[in-house]
Amino acid sequence: MHTRTLGTTLDRPLTVGAIGLGCMGMSWAYGDSATRDDTTSIAVIRRALDLGVTLIDTADVYGPFLNEELVGRAIAGRRDLVVLATKVGLVVEDATTYRIGRDGSPDHIRSGCEASLRRLGVEHIDLYQLHRPDPEVPIEDSIGAMAELVHAGKVAAIGVSEVTIDELRRAHAVHPVASVQSEMSLWTRDPLTEILPWCEANGVGFLPFAPLGRGFLTGRYRTGSDFGTGDFRASNPRFTDEAVAANLALADRVGEVAASLDATSGQVALAWLLAQGENVVPIPGTKRIAYLEENAGAHNVVLSPEALAALNDLPAAVGQRY
């Protein structure tokens, strides 16, 4: 697989496959315990490494804690192939409703890192990310604690997630940021305005999560009733029956472009992201090897100027993100 670089100004930039793997859905938010299949998920992660999908992204809050343990089992014996990314700064207040709180305090970050290292079964984390800024804690304090972990050799690089441009600048002033992770896709384009240009200008990688519009851009979902027990999309504003009906034209247009390129809709959605800059590394999630292989193939999809223009002209999605 083609590679890309996160944090080009760092002493030791991170080289990763152009497509990464988000592991959240294997343990959290996209189904309940009855639908979780750790054996298959471990096989997916190991197949990802075989394909050159080296950026493996998790977080302590997924599960909570179960996903890091799962990733740790999957990468055991193959640590040298992995650019391991995890996150700290969110806490689960109610697992049933997915109510999440924030804790960006230095003490929480330090203890969170130790716990993540233990669950992952590793001696260091390649990319340690602040999952969300804590409004009660200056971001300088949170990043300062993460910088201490870098100096201690427990973390190789620092990332941030879902930050404003002001928070990003302040974080970067404390310690160089290797990456920014935010939602971006053909139906969520907010980062294109300020965040992505800043990242490109400052040698910072950009990791789009939910790059397939939480599955919608693949064309597999046609109503808001397609989601089972424990799937948070069932209560997501963009997946009401009304919103899905309004957004089908967007998904269908992606499908038309895909058909013209002999690709899948998901591959086209990922190729559009890759075309936004050499610092962009999407991290689609999946629990199936077939979809993993499909996603990995997106790095070979070349969008013609006409196809890119058609995708750029797609209407905005109906419905709020959350």
Image (cartoon, rainbow, N blue to C red):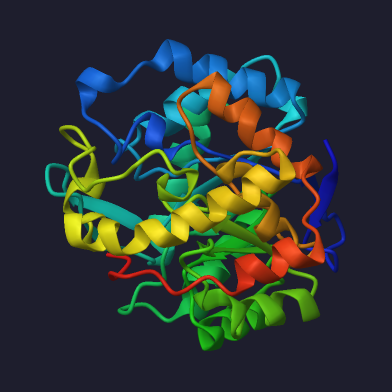
Residue 17's x, y, as percent? Answer: 77, 41
Whether 12 is drawn above or below 114: the answer is below
Q: Residue at x 55, y 85 (%)?
A: 165
The residue nearer to you, when weighing 253 against 225, is 253
Q: Is residue 301 above or below residue 275?
A: above
Q: Residue furthest bottom?
A: 166
Q: Please provide percent x and percent y for residue 115.
A: 43, 38
Name the side, left or right, on which 203 lies relative to 86: right
Residue 123 appearing in the image: no
- In this rendering, the count of numbered labels is 0
Is residue 250 something one can see in this rendering? Answer: yes
Q: Quadrant of residue 37?
A: top left
Q: Position of residue 51 (x, y in %)?
A: 74, 25
Q: Which residue is painted at 21% across and 48% down in the image?
A: 224
Q: Is residue 80 above or below residue 62?
A: above
Q: Residue at x 50, y 77 (%)?
A: 190
